[in-house]
Structures are given as C-alpha cells and as structure tokens.
Image (cartoon, helix red, strand yellow):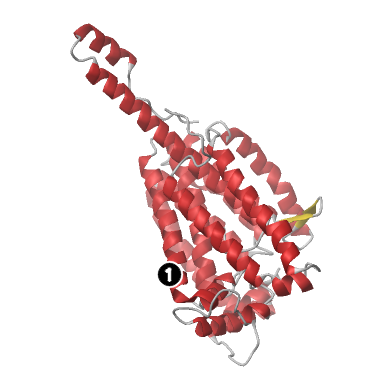
C-alpha cells in the first residue's frame, strides 16, 4: 500500500467531520469564554483561548493522527492495564467528592479517560469470551468493569455513569452475547431508570446520597420550569429564541456573556443564538454523519475486536453529543455533559481524541486489508495466462484476514 505523506489516514469523512467540529469549537469558544475566564480562571478571555484551547485542539488533532499509525490490536493489552490503573484516580476523586484531579497544574477529569479505556477493555473481554456467550455468568462477568466504573462515577456525575452503562450494554448487543438475557436486561433496565427518575423527582431532597438533591431539582426544573428564574437553562432558551433561524452574527451573543457555562454545557445554545437554527441543523448532521461513518467501519471490519472498539467508542461519543444538544434546547434536564470536540475543555477533548484515534486506526487497518486482498486478486488474474504461475500466485496470495487479539 502506498505510503501517504499527509497525516490524515483512516476514514476521510471522519477526518472532515472532526476538523469541522474543531473549527466550530475555535469559533464559539472564542466567542463565549469571557465570563468564565475572568471569574473562574482569573485571566483574560484572549489569553485563556490562545494559551489553552488552541493548544488543546491542536494536540487533539495530533493525537488522532498518532493513534491512526498504531495497530489497535497491539495496544489492547496495554489499554487493559491502563484501565485498571485509571481506577485509582477515579477512586481518589470519588472519596474527595469532586470530578477533577490536578496534575502539574492541569485539571484532569479521570472519568473521561476511564470510559474510553473501558470500551477497549470490554471489547477485548468480549472477544476472549466468544466460546461462552450463552452462559449467563459470562454476560454478568463482562458487565462487571462497567458496573465498577459507573459505581465510582455516579456520586458526582450521574449522566456519565448512565452513558457508560448504556454504551457497555449496547456493546454486548453488538457482540451477540446471550441475546435472550440481553433483551430481558434491556426491559428491566428501562423500568429501573423510569423508577429511578421518578424517585429522584419526588424524593430527591429527602435522600442524603451524593448529589441526589441536585438531580431532583434538575428534574423538577425541567418538568415544571420557572420562566422568571435566572438559571443557565432559562438563559439558554432565551438565547435560542433570540437566534431564530439565521442567528444574530458571530460575537453578538448577549446570554453567553451572562452564563458561566456558555463555553461548556450550553455552547450549543450560544451557537444557535449567534448562527441560528441553520448551524444547529448542520452540527446535528455532522454528528449523525460521524456515527454513520463509524457504523460503516463496523460493518467493513473483519475482526470482532475492531468492530466492538469502534461500536463502543462511537456510541459513547454520539450519546454524549445528543444529550448535550437535547439539554440545550430543553428536551432533557441539565446533565453537565459537554459537546464532544466543540465545548471548551482539556482532558475531555484529549481523551475523546484518543477514542477517535482508535476508530481511525481500525478504519485504516480495514483499508489496508482491502488493498492487500485486491492486490492479491489482481496478481492471480494477471498470471492466469500461465497455469503454473497462476497456481503459484493462488497458493501465495490467500486473502488477508483480520487477526483477533
């Protein structure tokens, strides 16, 4: 396969989507970082934007390019080790009642890295258990890592723990692990979450567990909103109403100047305010295209490990994007999820880039396998005039098969 000089290996459409999202991120974070830069980061918006966000976006692009050049099968064992090691900082932040840990002056959210490592570890475990799919014990054993991660995340971040459980559960479905038990758990899980949300709505204030009162208040504010209260979600709705279909123009946001999370959780609302519903539709299409291209990679991949890695990581990213956009427009209660590859962020941006890098590594491996198989087939046709050479070509040109871990 001819070596390319440029860095964009893998699925070209995914690269285009990713770079477009990064461009949108640079535009909108620059427009919305003001209040938080001054009050929370004690710096100027320009300095925070150029010294932090531009560097993070650049680093994310380089991370994706670097992981595209790594065989995803080779790193699977290392990722499995890193996954269990990543539980240590996750336990630490849970004990201290926070989401963040500071390392060398940088704030890192351990759950963002752990959830990516979990998808690779779970894919690896599913492949290694392929001869025991019908055993119910195997089903629950495979879910244990996801349950452990969710248990540590849930006290401070209920929405992330739910995304982790849903993505892990869907991966078992992709892998075909005990389909009958999977369907039963799907129904049981749906009932459980309905009961959980009803409980938090009515009893959240009366339960002293983690942030149960916050979760309850968010559900109550979503179901029975008070339009006179100056909240982030109300300002997001006013921003959307002001933007209309065409928007008010870049840098003209009013509500973004008043919101502390305009550059994070509610950046989608500010995008609509400044650029209108036309940009909102475009961004929604970009994420849909992202997931569609990932599913094409899943269908083309011959090895189950690669398929499961792409299915799990892409579902994780897509679910997070959908939840963030739904929260911004009022379809869901506030969750605290950022918009992947658009919202301001350091650790989140970089760790999601690792996930995308793995997806692109699988995509590039698919292309390489297809190229080698086509080359072998062409060599057989070219030598068909010489029976002896054709036999030799046939013997030496067996189709390249994807190897499992």
User: Looking at the image, which residue sits at the far bottom?
Assistant: 228
- Residue carrying label 1: 281
- Residue located 61% across and 69% down the image: 265
Horizontal relation, residue 354 to residue 177: left or right: right
Q: Nearer the viewer, residue 49 or 327?
A: 49
Q: Is residue 347 visible?
A: no
Q: Nearer the viewer, residue 272 or 308?
A: 272
Residue 350: give x, y in percent of width and height: 63, 51
- Residue located 51% across and 84% down the image: 241
Residue 168: give x, y in percent of width and height: 51, 51
Horizontal relation, residue 332 to residue 81: left or right: left
Question: Which element type, helix, strand or loop, lies under badge 1?
Answer: helix
Compared with 244, 88 (above or below) is above
Residue 283: give x, y in percent of width and height: 47, 65
- Residue located 45% across and 57% down the image: 185
On the rendered image, what quadrant is the N terminus found in?
A: top left
Compared with 315, 369 (above or below) is above
């Amino acid at each position: 396969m001819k070596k390319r000089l440029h860095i964009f290996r893998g699925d070209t459409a995914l690269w285009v989507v990713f770079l477009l999202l990064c461009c949108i991120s640079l535009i909108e974070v620059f427009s919305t970082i003001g209040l938080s830069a001054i009050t929370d980061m004690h710096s100027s918006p320009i300095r925070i934007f150029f010294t932090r966000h531009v560097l993070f976006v650049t680093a994310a692009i380089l991370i994706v390019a670097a992981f595209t050049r790594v065989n995803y099968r080779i790193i699977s064992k290392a990722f499995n080790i890193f996954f269990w090691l990543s539980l240590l900082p996750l336990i630490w932040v849970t004990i201290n009642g926070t989401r963040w840990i500071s390392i060398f002056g940088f704030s890192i959210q351990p759950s963002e890295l752990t959830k990516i490592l979990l998808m690779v570890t779970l894919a690896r475990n599913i492949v290694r258990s392929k001869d025991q799919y019908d055993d119910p014990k195997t089903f629950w054993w495979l879910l244990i890592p996801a349950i452990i991660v969710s248990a540590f995340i849930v006290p401070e971040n209920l929405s992330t723990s739910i995304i982790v459980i849903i993505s892990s559960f869907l991966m078992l479905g992709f892998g075909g692990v005990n389909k009958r038990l999977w369907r039963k758990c799907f129904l049981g899980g749906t009932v459980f979450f309905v009961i959980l949300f009803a409980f938090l709505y009515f009893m959240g204030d009366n339960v002293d567990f983690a942030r149960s009162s916050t979760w309850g208040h968010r559900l109550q504010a979503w179901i029975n909103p008070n339009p006179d209260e100056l909240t982030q979600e109300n300002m997001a709705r006013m921003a959307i109403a002001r933007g209309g279909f065409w928007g008010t123009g870049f840098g003209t946001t009013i509500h973004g100047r008043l919101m502390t999370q305009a550059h994070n959780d509610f950046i989608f609302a500010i995008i609509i305010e400044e650029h209108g519903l036309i940009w909102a539709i475009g961004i929604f299409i970009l994420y849909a295209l992202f997931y569609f291209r990932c599913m094409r990679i899943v269908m083309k991949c011959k090895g189950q490990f690669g398929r499961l890695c792409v299915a799990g990581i892409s579902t994780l990213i897509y679910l997070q994007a959908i939840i963030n956009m739904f929260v911004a427009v009022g379809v869901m209660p506030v969750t605290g999820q950022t918009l992947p590859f658009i919202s301001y962020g350091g650790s989140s941006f970089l760790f999601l880039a690792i996930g995308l890098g793995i997806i692109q590594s699988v995509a590039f491996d698919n292309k390489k396998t297809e190229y080698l198989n086509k080359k072998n087939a062409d060599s057989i046709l070219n030598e068909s005039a010489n029976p002896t050479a054709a036999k030799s070509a046939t013997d030496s040109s067996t189709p390249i098969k994807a190897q499992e871990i």
